[in-house]
Image (cartoon, rainbow, N blue to C red):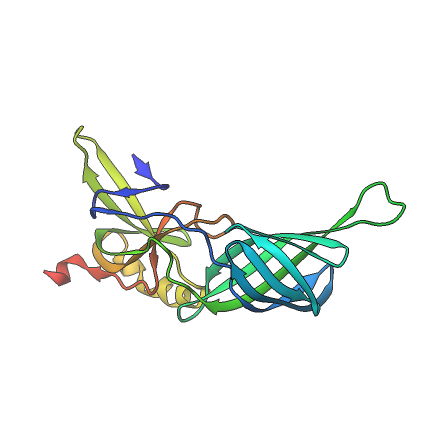
């Protein structure tokens, strides 16, 4: 049985738990229905967010996934998506809708908006360091280490630990990984679990955190 989600790592004796993503403070490049400017997140504490949008101050809420606030007469809501960047940094994108009430209109108008920032990637809550031994597998434009173990019922279970790399890192990995395809490898790294939608890996997937540096198992004996 292949397990992708909510994995109990009996193979490693570890449990990896999910966590709510952090909303980075700082200056975001924002585009609201074509109007470009800055979204400044000043503080995020206990679910409360303070900041400015186009130099107008606001106070909103953050539940670990969705940002909601009001600026002037407009209401904003956005989901956060993150992806790995270069050198232990991450690219964060807020994307959602702006709702504007218009006099005389039967319903408020709704338009799109998004904001982006690149910031240091925090170490996820629940990230654990482990030595993973399994078979290196290339699956199209994706890669993972397959770890198999026999259960008490005599069946074989497979756990997949995915490679989650930036575009720049993939430019190197596309040359270094093919020679390892189908071979036993050992990877010592931190593990984390994907806790958001919209990334290149499915929500709940287990992945290697940081630089992916596999070693041939035969070379470590």
Q: How many marks?
A: 0
Residue 215 found in image quarter: bottom left
Which quadrant: the N terminus? top left
Query: In the image as oriented, which residue stretches furthest toward the right?
Result: 104
Taking the image as shown, residue 148 lies to the left or right of residue 69, namely: left
Q: Residue at x 31, y 38 (%)?
A: 2
Q: Relative to 60, is 107 above or below? A: above
Q: Residue at x 32, y 55 (%)?
A: 127
Camera-side residue: 119 or 208?
119
Q: Residue 72, position in %: x, y?
A: 75, 59
Which quadrant: the C terminus? bottom left
Q: Relative to 193, is 150 above or below? A: above
Q: Residue at x 48, y 68 (%)?
A: 119
Taking the image as shown, residue 50 lies to the left or right of residue 171, namely: right
Q: Residue 93, position in %: x, y?
A: 56, 59
Query: In the image as oriented, which residue stretches furthest toward the left?
Result: 221
Q: Relative to 7, is 83 above or below? A: below
Q: Residue 107, position in %: x, y?
A: 81, 42
Q: Residue 69, position in %: x, y?
A: 65, 55
Camera-side residue: 69 or 207?
69
Camera-side residue: 210 or 177?
210
């Amino acid at each position: 049985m292949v397990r992708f989600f909510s994995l109990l790592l009996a193979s490693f004796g570890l449990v990896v738990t999910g966590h709510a993503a952090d909303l980075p403070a700082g200056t975001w490049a924002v585009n609201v229905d074509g109007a470009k400017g800055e979204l400044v997140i000043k503080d995020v504490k206990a679910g409360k967010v303070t900041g400015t949008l186009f130099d107008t101050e606001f106070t909103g809420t953050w539940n670990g996934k969705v940002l909601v606030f009001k600026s002037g007469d407009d209401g904003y809501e956005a989901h956060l998506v993150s992806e790995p960047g270069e050198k232990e940094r991450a690219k964060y994108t807020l994307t959602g809708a702006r709702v504007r009430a218009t006099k005389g209109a039967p319903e408020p108008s709704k338009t799109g908006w998004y904001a982006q920032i690149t910031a240091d990637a925090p170490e996820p809550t629940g990230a654990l360091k482990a030595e993973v031994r399994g078979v290196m597998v290339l699956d199209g434009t994706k890669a993972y280490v397959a770890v198999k173990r026999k259960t008490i019922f005599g069946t074989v279970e497979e756990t997949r630990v995915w490679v989650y790399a930036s575009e720049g890192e993939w430019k190197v990995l596309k040359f270094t990984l093919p020679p390892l395809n189908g071979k036993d490898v050992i990877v010592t790294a931190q593990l984390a679990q994907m806790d958001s939608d919209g990334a290149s890996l499915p929500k709940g997937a287990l992945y290697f955190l940081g630089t992916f540096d596999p070693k041939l198992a035969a070379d470590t004996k």
